[in-house]
Amino acid sequence: MFMDALLGRSSAVRSVAVTFEPIAPERSTREVEAAITRDRADHELRRRFGQSETARQRQARDATRRREWELATGHGEVRLSGFVTVSGRDREDLRRASSQVLEHAARARLELHCMYGQQADAFTFTLPLCRGLR
């Protein structure tokens, strides 16, 4: 539902694609172990200087521990990449549609970046290659 603002009703012509790339378990384990070590070092440093831990820092630490637990129980991690192609009849229509899509993405708390110089490659990311069963 978080993408509803981007995918919902709009006058802009756009295509959206999301890809999932599995991350090697060894890499995930290394990264989470490094994150736990960083969290512990940060916590100890804050304790030494008498600084209290913020709610955001506690949430980040808990998320890292949850991630470690999930990896230990056999869950895998994936990297997500999303792509949005915006189309228009002319430059002005394209500008308007792009602004509208950026606004909708911001409402969905998504940050979009233009792929300057990579438009041809980026366009292929949202081509309708698989149309499902008929």
Image (cartoon, helix red, strand yellow):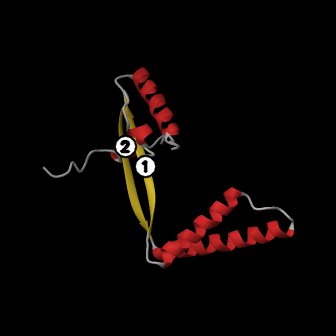
Q: Earlier in the sequence, mark 2 or mark 1?
A: 2
Instruction: Tell me the element at label 2.
Output: strand
83 shown above or below 94 = below
Residue 81 in the figure: left or right of residue 29 = left
Residue 27 visible from this viewpoint? no
For label 2, the residue is 16
The residue nearer to you, when weighing 25 against 4, is: 4
**Residues marked 2 and 1 touching at CB (< 8 Å):** yes
Neighbour tally class for label 1: few under 14, some 14-19, many 20 plus, Cα within 10 Å: few
Q: Amino acid at mark 2?
A: Val
Q: Residue at x 64, y 72 (%)?
A: 36
Residue 54 in the figure: left or right of residue 70 = right
Instruction: Tell me the element at label 1.
Output: strand
Q: Residue at x 16, y 52 (%)?
A: 133
Residue 90 visible from this viewpoint? yes
Q: Amino acid at mark 1?
A: Gly
Residue 29 in the figure: left or right of residue 43 = left
Q: CA distance from mark 2 to mark 1?
A: 7 Å
Residue 52 in the figure: left or right of residue 132 = right
Task: Give the percent coordinates (x, y) of residue 63.
Answer: 58, 65
The residue nearer to you, when weighing 54 against 83, is: 54
Task: Give the percent coordinates (x, y) of residue 33.
Answer: 60, 75
The residue nearer to you, when weighing 11 against 89, is: 11
**Which image quarter: residue 5?**
top left
Neighbour tally class for label 2: few under 14, some 14-19, many 20 plus, Cα within 10 Å: some
Q: Residue at x 23, y 51 (%)?
A: 130
For label 1, the residue is 82
Task: Give the percent coordinates (x, y) of residue 26.
Answer: 50, 77
122 shown above or below 33 = above
5 shown above or below 39 = above
